Amino acid sequence: MPPTSMGHCLTTLPSLRDALDVVSGKWKLLILVALATGHQRFRDIERSVPGISSKVLAKELKDLEQHQLIQRTVQEGPPVLVTYEVLPYADTLDPVIFALREWGLNHRRKIMGAGSEA
């Protein structure tokens, strides 16, 4: 990173903190990717994100909804059907997701060697 002025740092840090508040943790971006690839129901999302618990998924979905990245729709039943969908505002995270994916691939190569592209 190039050296920056103290003023630039003071204006960058709050914006960076805001962004991290929205996408923090290891699950939010994975959930957004799962939703963007067609998983709309709670159990489908849960199955598509290995290792996430129901409790954590419910909390993260609420957070994503509060940040206006996803929408929860309840269709009265019986049975009651709850679906989730990515809102257009979430598309603004695409460059972040792709950049993190690329960085992760490069980091994996650096740490584990050239043949580890899983």
Image (cartoon, grey):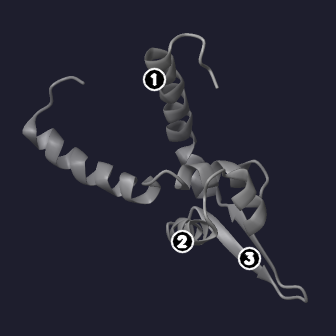
Residue 107 image point, x, y percent: 45, 23
C-alpha span from label 2 to label 1: 29 Å
Quarter of the image where one finds residue 57 = bottom right
C-alpha span from label 3 to label 1: 38 Å
Q: Residue at x 58, y 72 (%)?
A: 55
* Residue 106 visible at all: yes
The foreground one among 83 and 44 is: 44
* Residue 41 visible at all: no
**Relative to 3, 91 lies left or right:** right
Name the residue beneath numbered marker 3: 73
The foreground one among 92 and 50 is: 50
Residue 65 image point, x, y percent: 57, 70
Foreground label between 3 and 1: 1
Q: Which mark is residue 30?
A: none
Q: Which mark is residue 59?
A: 2
Mark 2 or mark 3: name the one nearer the start of the chain.
Answer: 2
Residues at discs 2 and 3 in contact (Cβ within 8 Å): no
- Circle 3 Cα neighbour tier, 10 Å, few/some/many (<14 / 14–19 / ≥20): few
Foreground label between 2 and 3: 2
Q: Is residue 64 above or below residue 94?
A: below
Quick one: SS at disc 1? helix
- Circle 1 Cα neighbour tier, 10 Å, few/some/many (<14 / 14–19 / ≥20): few
**The residue under label 2 is which amino acid type?**
Lys
**Relative to 76, 111 lies left or right:** left
Name the residue beneath numbered marker 1: 107
Residue 49 image point, x, y percent: 66, 52
Residues at discs 2 and 1 in contact (Cβ within 8 Å): no
Residue 13 image point, x, y percent: 23, 48
Mark 3 or mark 1: name the one nearer the start of the chain.
Answer: 3
Residue at the far left in the pictured view: 6
**The residue under label 1 is which amino acid type?**
His
